[in-house]
Every structure is written in structure tokens, then in C-alpha cells.
């Protein structure tokens, strides 16, 4: 899979941009704050309809403008044109100029794997960060997963609202709560099974990828869930046992919205005992495994974005990662210093220099 070209209108600091890309390696460089990450962020929004940064959609729109447009031609098993349009009222997506009514029907069409400095927080930060990474990864290979997740979240919101009503109104019945709980369990079990299957596949790959990076085996991911090996009837009993707690809290204390991951190197929990280097290497192994999973499931490599990792990892490590990658993977690298990239690796790649939202120089490195 590769993106042939990209058109931006009113995206971040790009008022108008029309650019083509190399089918293998694209090196984007310039000083901080000039728009390097904005350019690769636009690719991720085109693929996922949302930024990999923690921002709301309307903040992607160029200041003083009302609407942004991102358009790109993607070559995969077929050639298609994709478009994302965002304004203050929401977003629209189109494929070959035909509006796609549900965002969930659009996501998974363009596959992208992103390494960014924020990804290094996956191990050490909160469970919500890890769940976000789970959802993005699985949504790209399974369209029904995102639909089930959206349905689960709707039912969860309704259940939480009803719990608050029950807490202040003695005349409410448990019957409606039981209906909501049953629906929550049904969707939760579907999501749990997909997550379980995904991390079984992940663990078949991540140990070897960690070994390629470090020369050390033993990396595994533990998937933790309240639904672990539970049937629907068992879960119903568990929800009944937590009802008093839920009424006090005004929210559902049990479910797949509390799922988490643990990264272990042999018997060592990397979040608690791992060095920063071990944590970073584990995330690199995770991302390399994501690439392989997408290739296995979708029969095509994803687009790969390496955003500003030279600021987080040593030059040798990044260049070794690039060497591991299959030449069929279209890769985008952003950096402040082009000299950090091994000249052997960027032979015939496209070099794009960014200065304050302007593409000042484009050439093929030879």
C-alpha cells in the first residue's frame, strides 16, 4: 500500500499543498515548528479520520478558516481516491467522490503504522493510552470491531446514565438495567474475543522482533480483562455483585473499558522495572509486529510513519530499524537533521524540506 500524492487545504499551517511521494522512502526535514509532523499527521488523518496527536478535530483547521480538506490517491489492490473534510460541525469522508455515511465503513481502507514520541508512553502511561493503541490497531484490520466498540460505548453511556437515575429515584426498576447489562455483555464479549485473538497473534511475532532489535528474547504482552475466559452468565453475576458499587460511583466499574496490557521481559514487568531503553525497544518491536499483522491479514504492507524518533532514539537504532524493514513498505521519516540518516539508506529516496509550511525543496537523493 502506498500514497501516491496528497492535497491539503487549510490543514494546520498548510493553506494549500499538492505533493507527490516516493513509493519507498520519503525523508521530511526542517527545523522544529515548521510543519514536518503536520504533513505526516495529514496522512494519518486521511487513513484514520483522526490525528495521532491528542487534539480535537476543529484544532486541525488553519486559523481563521472554517473547513479543511485532505485528499490522497492510494495504490493498494486497487487505486482509489480518498478524501476527509472537517469543519466545526463534524467530518465527512469520501471514496472516489462517493460519500461514505459511516466513519466505521471508511476506517480500515488505508492502513498506517505510526512511530511517534508519544507512542513511547504506551508502556509507562495510563491504561486508556494502551486501550487507544489497541483500538487503532484492530480497527485497521477488522471493520466489525469498530462497529462493536461504538455500540458498546453507546450502551455503556446509557447504563451509566441509568445508574445515576437509579441512585436518586427509588421507583426505578432493575429490569431496564438488566437489558442494558445484557447488551453490554454481548458487545463486550465480541470485543474481548477480537482483542484476545489479536494479542495471541502479536505474541507470536513480538518476541522475534525484539530479538532482531536487541539480540535478547523473552518479550511478551499480557492482555488483562474483566471478561477473561468468562461466559455471559458468569458476567451477569459479576455485574450484579458490583451493582451497589456502581450506584455509589454512578458508573460501570466492570467491563472491557477497563482492559489493559502488561509488557513483560521474561518475568520482569517493564512498566515497573524496565529501563527506558528496554521500554523503547519493546514499543519498536510492537510496531514492527503491527506491520506484519496487517500484511498477514490485509495481504499488503501498511504505510509507515517514523515521526521525530531521532529525538528519542540514537541514530544507530533508527537506522537499524529502517534496515529491518521490507523495501516494499512506503516509509515517511521526519527529522530536524538530515545528516542523522544513513546515506546508504536514503539512496534514491525523496527528500522534502519544510520551512514554515512551505515545501522549499524536493528532490530524489542519489
Image (tube, rainbow, N blue to C red):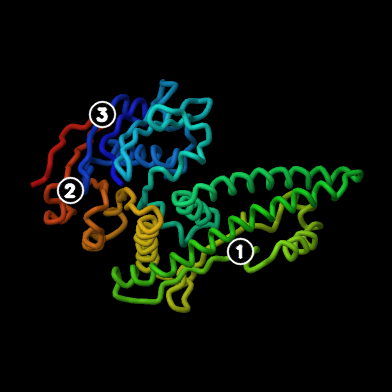
Q: Residues within 10 Å of mark 3 (few under 14, many from 20)?
A: few
Q: Is residue 87 above or below residue 354?
A: above
Left or right: 230 as drawn, with respect to 262: right
**C-alpha separation, residue under disc 3 versus residue under disc 1:** 45 Å
Q: CA distance from mark 2 to mark 3?
A: 23 Å
Closer to the chain start, of discs 3 and 1, is 3
Q: CA distance from mark 1 to mark 2?
A: 44 Å
Secondary element at tag 3: strand
Asked if marks 2 and 3 touch (Cβ < 8 Å), the reply is: no
Residue 155 higher or lower than 209, as above or below: above
Residue found at x 69% / y 58%: 254
In the drawing, does residue 179 fall left or right of residue 200?
right
Which of the marked residues, 2 or 3, is nearer the chain's N terminus?
Answer: 3
Residue 229 picture location, percent across and down? 63, 69
Q: Residue at x 44, y 49 (%)?
A: 140
Q: How many marks?
A: 3
| Badge 1 or badge 2: first in the primary sequence | 1
Residue corresponding to mark 2: 338
Mark 2: few/some/many CA within 10 Å (<14, 14-19, 20+): some
Q: Are marks 1 and 2 in contact (CB under 8 Å)?
A: no
Which numbered disc covers residue 225? 1
Residue at 37% x, 69% y is 278
For label 3, the residue is: 18
Is 103 in front, or is 15? 103
Name the mark on residue 67.
none
Q: Position of residue 31 (x, y in %)?
A: 24, 41
Find numbered disc 2 in the image and state the secondary structure of the residue it sits on: helix
Residue 330 percent across, percent down from the top left: 26, 48
Q: Name the residue nearer the viewer: 179 or 314.
A: 179
Which residue is at a point 32% across and 52% down the rendered structure image?
Answer: 301
Q: Secondary structure at mark 1?
A: loop
Amino acid at each position: 500500500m502506498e500514497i501516491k500524492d496528497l492535497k491539503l487545504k487549510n490543514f494546520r499551517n498548510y493553506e494549500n499543498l499538492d505533493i507527490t511521494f516516493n513509493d519507498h522512502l520519503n525523508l521530511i526535514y526542517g527545523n522544529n515548528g515548521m510543519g514536518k509532523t503536520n504533513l505526516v499527521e495529514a496522512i494519518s488523518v486521511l487513513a484514520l479520520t483522526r490525528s495521532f496527536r491528542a487534539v480535537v478535530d476543529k484544532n486541525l483547521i488553519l486559523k481563521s478558516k472554517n473547513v479543511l480538506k485532505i485528499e490522497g490517491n492510494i495504490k493498494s489492490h486497487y487505486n482509489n481516491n480518498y478524501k476527509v473534510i472537517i469543519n466545526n460541525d463534524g467530518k465527512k469522508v469520501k471514496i472516489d467522490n462517493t460519500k461514505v455515511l459511516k466513519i466505521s465503513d471508511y476506517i480500515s481502507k488505508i492502513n498506517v503504522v505510526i512511530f511517534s514520541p508519544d507512542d513511547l508512553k504506551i508502556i509507562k502511561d495510563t491504561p486508556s493510552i494502551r486501550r487507544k493503541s489497541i483500538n487503532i490497531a484492530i480497527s485497521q484490520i477488522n471493520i466489525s470491531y469498530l462497529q462493536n466498540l461504538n455500540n458498546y460505548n453507546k450502551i455503556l453511556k446509557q447504563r451509566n446514565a441509568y445508574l445515576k437515575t437509579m441512585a436518586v429515584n427509588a421507583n426505578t426498576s432493575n429490569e431496564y438495567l438488566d437489558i442494558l447489562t445484557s447488551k453490554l455483555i454481548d458487545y463486550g464479549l465480541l470485543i474481548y474475543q477480537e482483542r484476545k485473538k489479536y494479542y495471541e497473534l502479536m505474541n507470536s511475532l513480538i518476541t522475534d522482533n525484539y530479538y532482531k532489535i536487541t539480540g535478547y528474547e523473552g518479550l511478551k504482552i499480557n492482555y488483562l480483562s474483566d471478561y477473561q475466559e468468562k461466559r455471559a452468565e458468569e458476567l451477569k453475576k459479576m455485574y450484579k455483585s458490583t451493582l451497589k458499587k456502581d450506584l455509589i460511583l454512578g458508573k460501570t466499574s466492570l467491563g472491557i473499558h477497563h482492559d489493559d496490557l502488561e509488557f513483560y521481559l521474561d518475568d520482569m514487568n517493564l512498566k515497573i522495572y524496565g529501563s527506558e531503553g528496554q521500554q523503547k525497544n519493546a514499543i519498536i518491536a510492537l510496531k514492527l509486529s503491527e506491520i506484519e499483522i496487517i500484511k498477514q491479514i490485509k495481504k499488503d504492507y501498511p504505510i509507515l510513519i517514523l515521526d521525530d524518533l531521532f529525538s528519542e532514539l540514537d541514530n544507530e537504532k533508527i537506522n537499524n530499524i529502517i534496515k529491518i524493514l521490507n523495501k516494499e513498505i512506503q516509509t515517511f521519516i521526519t527529522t530536524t537533521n538530515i545528516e542523522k540518516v544513513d546515506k546508504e539508506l536514503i539512496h534514491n529516496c525523496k527528500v522534502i524540506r519544510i520551512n514554515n509550511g512551505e515545501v522549499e525543496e524536493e528532490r530524489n537523493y542519489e
